[in-house]
Amino acid sequence: MITIKSEREIALLKEAGHIVALCLEAMKEHVKPGVTTEELDKICEKIILDNGGVPACKGYEGYPCTICASVNEVVVHGIPSKKQKLREGDIVTVDLVAGYKGYHGDSAYTFKVGKVSPKVEKLLEVTHDALYVGLSKVKEGAHLGDVSAAIGDYINQFGYGIIDTYTGHGIGREMHEDPAIMNFGTPGTGPILKEGMVLAIEPMVSMGKKDIRIMKDGWTAVMKDGSPAAHFEHTIVVRKEGYEILTYNTL
Ligand code: MF3
Ligand code: CO
């Protein structure tokens, strides 16, 4: 069941989303060669706690950290580690969820570590733009399939892989609520959007094939063909004539 949030709930979701945005904004100065993904995790955890939030991923189905830090061919759910130092030319996706007074904000951003190759630059640009192409279809009365199809059709023009093992999702009191939001689809299908639905939309795109495997830690999702992957995500609320981003950041 897809729930409609009240304006009171949306205000709390926006508080949660703002805490996530503060974390991602802080990553801009900290993501550089030599930093470890564990250091990034600690910085985000402190920001969340300092702002009265809860690191919602920590302990979620046994996940051990505050953020997911997914480097290069890792697409999602990379576990931060003190052994993992970022290097010039890497990309790292920081994906995190903050809880605030029982509500959640979820957002992800793929950062460049120093200068990256033009091919990787393009992958990041297309994945970022795919999120906004999808968002442009969001408004009351649209079908969810309109959003999914817009994302998928945009990405397919570039011949990239669209990860189908993971999806966007509703969000609210729970980190993951209905509906699942595929990153490809057919216009005019799926549930009809209504004002007050809160959705996390998150294209996950690889430079090569779409297939992933999970590493022995049970979390890390890595591209089977070793190709780099990118991921951009915002939590948004459906409005009558469009949408409002609840995890808005200045990146
Ligand atoms: N944004 C991630 C997701 O929607 C959050 C993962 S937290 C984890 O899957 F605990 F599941 F890792
Ligand atoms: Co999410």
Image: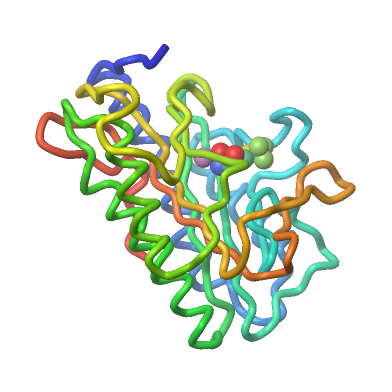
Horizontal and vertical percent position of residue 66: 66, 44
Horizontal and vertical percent position of residue 122: 44, 77
Which residue is at 41% across, 61% downward?
155
The reply to whether residue 221 is visible in this rendering is yes
The reply to whether residue 49 is visible in this rendering is no
Horizontal and vertical percent position of residue 23: 50, 54
Which residue is at 43% across, 62% downward?
127
State the image quarter where residue 228 is shown: bottom right
Q: Is residue 100 above or below residue 89?
A: above
> Position of 56 compared to 107: left or right?
right
Which residue is at 35% across, 55% downward?
153
Which residue is at 77% across, 44% downward?
219
> Position of 32 compared to 223: left or right?
left
> Position of 161 compared to 7: left or right?
right
* View extreme (left): residue: 241
Q: Quadrant of the C terminus?
A: bottom left
State the image quarter where residue 31 is shown: bottom right
* View extreme (right): residue: 216
> Position of 164 compared to 245: left or right?
right
